[in-house]
Image: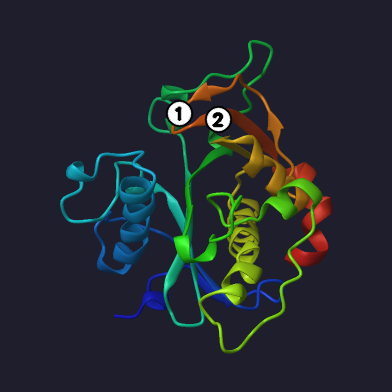
Amino acid sequence: MMLNRLVGWDRRDPLTPNFNFFGSVCERAKESLFLDVFRLRYEVYCRECRFLDAADYPDGLESDAYDASAYHVAARNEADQIVGTVRLVFADAAGRFPFEDHCTTFADFTFPPRAECAEVSRLVVSKGYRRRPGDTMQGVSKNFVEKGRPDAIPIDPDDPEGKHRRRISPQILMGMFRQIYLHSRDNGTHYWFAAMEKSLARSLDRMGFHYTQVGPEVDYYGPVAVYFADLRVLKNDLRNSSE
């Protein structure tokens, strides 16, 4: 069975022409069509960054209890390889989100209706798309984070694994966030939370996804803070490129 038989959509975005993006709810966390997603997460979270203990995942697949009800997005390159993934996690039966087990919001922050919220988590990009010194874990260059400009590296057809990968890697982040935005817009999710580092928040801001820090910085897989986005505020910025 091919991946696009299960997913909610399969589209090539004109702003991210080097990748296809896929989205689906994974009702069975070990569904065979999601193995590449969980394998990529294992490579990044367990083997590369060692955020999680690889011994806890003897099958080489990083998955947790939130996956079964989350909305997953994956990016696939021109060689049909899964090279990026992110998920939207919704409130549990008690109305809580995963970030609340590790991070807090500021005392003056008013939580919106939790049924209208989702947490953006498990954002990973394959190591092959972040090879420059200073690249973030999401494949965005230091030049883009600091100045909002992509690196001017010409495409070399004889170097498909090198400069070309580094040049197009921000497309992965842009494409995945555009797709979770479209899903949220169409399914009654109006607010996002994310526990992330400042560099990622800055990169997303450069792309038009504006987050506000609403919690203190803590050590949770590195220095992160809780950020918040009102998708209705984003709508005007993204309307022309999302429709």
Residue 1 to residue 36: above or below: below
Which amino acid type is shown beneath numbered disc 1?
Tyr
Q: Can residue 231 be seen in this view?
A: yes
Which amino acid type is shown beneath numbered disc 2?
Val
- Which secondary structure lies at badge 1? loop
Q: Nearer the viewer, residue 79 or 75?
A: 79
Please say if the residues under marks 2 and 1 sit with CB atoms less than 8 Å apart. Answer: yes
Q: Label for residue 224?
A: 2
Percent x, y of residue 8: 48, 68
Q: Mark 1 points at which residue?
A: 220
Q: Residue at x 64, y 27 (%)?
A: 112
In this rendering, position of residue 131 left or right of residue 6: right
Percent x, y of residue 93: 38, 30
Distance in Å between CA atoms under marks 2 and 1 = 6 Å
Q: Nearer the viewer, residue 162 or 21?
A: 162
Percent x, y of residue 99: 47, 29
Q: Residue at x 38, y 71 (%)?
A: 6
Q: Dividing the image into 4 quarters, which one contains the C terminus?
A: bottom right
Q: Quadrant of residue 118?
A: top right
Give the crowd class for mark 2: few <14, some 14-19, many >=20 residues within 10 Å: many
Give the crowd class for mark 1: few <14, some 14-19, many >=20 residues within 10 Å: some
